[in-house]
Structure formats: C-alpha cells, structure tokens
Image (tube, helix red, strand yellow):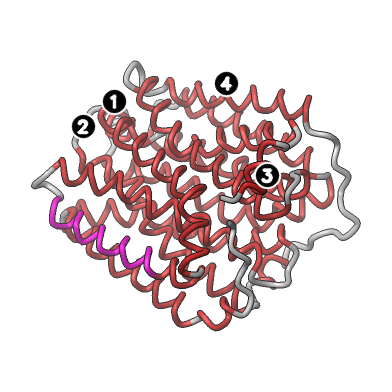
Amino acid sequence: MGEQEKASLRRQPKAVWATALAAAFAFMGIGLVDPILPAIAANLDASPSQVSLLFTSYFTVNAFAMLLTGFVSTRIGGKRTLLVGLAVIVVFATLAGTSDHVNALVGFRAGWGLGNALFVATALAVIVGVASGGASTAIILYEAAIGVGMALGPLLGALLGGWQWRAPFFGTATLMAAAFIALLALLPTMPAPARRTRLRDPLLALGHRGLRTVAGSAIFYNYGFFTILAFTPFVLGMDAYGIGAVFVGWGVMVAIFSVIVAPRLQSRLGTVRTLAAVLVLLALVMVGYAAAAGRSVGVVVALTIFSGALLGVNNTLYTELAMSVSDAPRPVASAGYNFMRWLGGAVAPFAATKIGEVFGAPVTYLVTAVLVLVGTAIVLGGRRYLSAHAPAPLS
C-alpha cells in the first residue's frame, strides 16, 4: 500500500469506521459457529451434515436476498437499509440462542442470512460513497473489515462456546445491537438515489461477460472456501477452544493477505494471473487435506492456517473485479456477483459434509480440489473479458 493510500485510510470520517466495524461484526457471524459445530451436533443430537445446514440455510437466503438489496436500498436509503439489516440479525441471532432442535436453529440462521444480506451488500456501497480516497481505498477498508470479522468470529465462538454453546449467538446479538446504535448516531442520513434499482437489474448485470466470468468462477472458489470453514472443524477433532485457535490463525491470515499482500501481488503479476495462480494453490491445499485427513492433525492445522493467506488474496481480487469489470452501477454489479458466489457457499457445507459421511474426508477434499480447478478454468477461459476491464492496481 502506498503512502497516499495509508494517509487516506487515516483520514476517513467516523461514519466510515462505524460502518466498517459493523461489517466486521456481521462477518464474525460466519465463522462464529465454527468452534461450536461439534458441540451443537452433540447437544442437539444431530449429524455433521445436519449441523452444516446452519451454513446452507444462511447462505441460500443470503444469496437470493442479494437480489433484493438494491431494490430496498434505493427506495429507503442506505442508512435505513443498514439499520433494518442489523435489526433482523439481532432478532434471529437471539432466537438462534434459544433453539432446542437443530431444525429450529437452521431456520433462525436462514433469517439471520436475510439480515446479513441487507447489511453486507449495502455496507460496501455506503463505504464507497462515504469514504475519502476513492473506490480502491473503500474496498481495502471493506476487505479489512471482512478479515477482522473472520478472525474474531472463531475467537468469540471459542471463548463463549467453550462455556456454553448458546452463548456465541447471544454475544453476536449484543454486538450487532451495539453496531445498530453506533450507525444510528454516526452515519449521516443518506437519501435514496434518484434512479431506483429494479429487481431484475442484478440478473441483467450478469449478462456482461466479464462480470459473469468473475461470478461463475467465484461459485467454485466459494465452494472451496466453505469446505474449509464448515467441514474442517469436524476433521480437526478438537474442542471449541482448539478449533477456535486454529480458525483465529486462519482469520488473521485472511486479514493480512487481503489488505497488505493482495495489492502487491496484483501490481506485480496482474489480477487475472494472481487469481488463477492462487486458485491452483488452493486446489493443491485440498489435495494436501485429502492426504492428511485422519492421519495428521498437525498438517490439517497448518493447511488451514495457510489457506487463510490464499483466501485473503482472492477475496480482495474477486471483489475488486466484480466492482470494476462491468459498466453496471457498483451496487447492482455487487448484488449480481454476490448472488452467484453465495450459492457456492450455500452448497458447499452440506455437500462437503455429506460426501465425507458417505465416502470419507479424503474424497470430500479431492472433489473440492476438482471444483476449485473448474473455477480456475473459468477465469482463464474468460480472461480476455476480465483483462479488457481490469481494475487499476490497488497499490
């Protein structure tokens, strides 16, 4: 990151920092359940694949709700949309903590996904609109918030979940309520834009070959991402504190590599080349998981933490491409892109866990490796559409 970007980051208004902090809290909700997945299965008498539906319901609703975010925010304004999203998360996170059956918990996580979609999709647009220093600085801030949330989610889940598996849900509700108050006080009222987004606009935006290439590849990339996040806790065979410690290390790597390393690699190698290279490395990590699963917990731990570096790089580059590669307005392009990529996040947890239950963990990871390579092929096959509209380097 250059001196100009560093100075720009320091000069952000309070509203930007409040929104970024709230975004970090929102992303904590993704990794929050990681350390307590085995505990939930044990306490609610559920199988790993049943527990994995906590991710599947969350991301299925999250994906389809992305198509609604622009429709809602362009009618009631960005601030109100953020506050509605936060309020929905508070309600359903609290309800999740009261669940006595895995099906109820899965249902409440689906409602949580609706709130998360309203908040997260709008947060990026709000940060881009309010931040000083341009879109690149805003994206760095947004990805930093994601990284911090990914790192702190497992930590909160471990600290609270080691005491009581319900506690992380109540803890998240409390944090999101605090974020609601902060945004209510610090974020200026944002009038609805003159042009209202139609429900079909995000899908129409995917007609652009560049955006469709990015989103199509992201489906398979996110399948790999959430295989690690939702399936690997069962492979580790640790308690909540152990799983939490591993995924805190993973989240720290996501944060560091998304903010610091991704811009440098992009500047040196180019966006498309970096994306493809990291996807190939991610596929190799999956092969390593297949070889180590059930044989070496230490290797699984090392691969998990290392994967955070790869995911951090590509998180930033996928987001930057999605926001820049087409002529669609950024909120519309983001909604279309997120709709497709979260479908990968919806399928992966249940599919990966079910394959593991039937065929064993090595097969899960080998299937994932193949799918990540499909994502690589999509990037390389559509590289001329990406290169024609490649974003300027972040550094």
Residue 174: image tag: 4
Q: Amino acid at mark 3?
A: Ala
Mark 4 residue crowding within 10 angstroms, few (<14) / some (14–19) / many (20+): some
Q: Amino acid at mark 2?
A: Met
Measured in 3D between alpha carbons, the distance from the residue under mark 3 to the one under mark 1, in whole angstroms, is 31 Å
Q: Closer to the camera: disc 3 or disc 4?
A: 3
Q: Amino acid at mark 4?
A: Thr
The residue tagged 3 is 123
In percent of width and height, residue 94 lies at 54, 25
In contact (CB < 8 Å): disc 1 and disc 2: yes
Measured in 3D between alpha carbons, the distance from the residue under mark 3 to the one under mark 4, in whole angstroms, is 19 Å
Mark 1 residue crowding within 10 angstroms, few (<14) / some (14–19) / many (20+): many
In percent of width and height, residue 18 lies at 68, 31
In percent of width and height, residue 255 lies at 46, 43
Q: Which residues are magenta?
A: 277-292
Mark 2 residue crowding within 10 angstroms, few (<14) / some (14–19) / many (20+): some
- Mark 3 vs mark 1: which is more N-terminal? 3
**Does residue 278 belong to the magenta stretch?**
yes
- Residue 321: quadrant of the picture: bottom right
- Residue 55: quadrant of the picture: top left
Q: Amino acid at mark 1?
A: Tyr
In contact (CB < 8 Å): disc 3 and disc 4: no
Q: What secondary structure is marked by label 4?
A: helix
- Residue 256: quadrant of the picture: top left
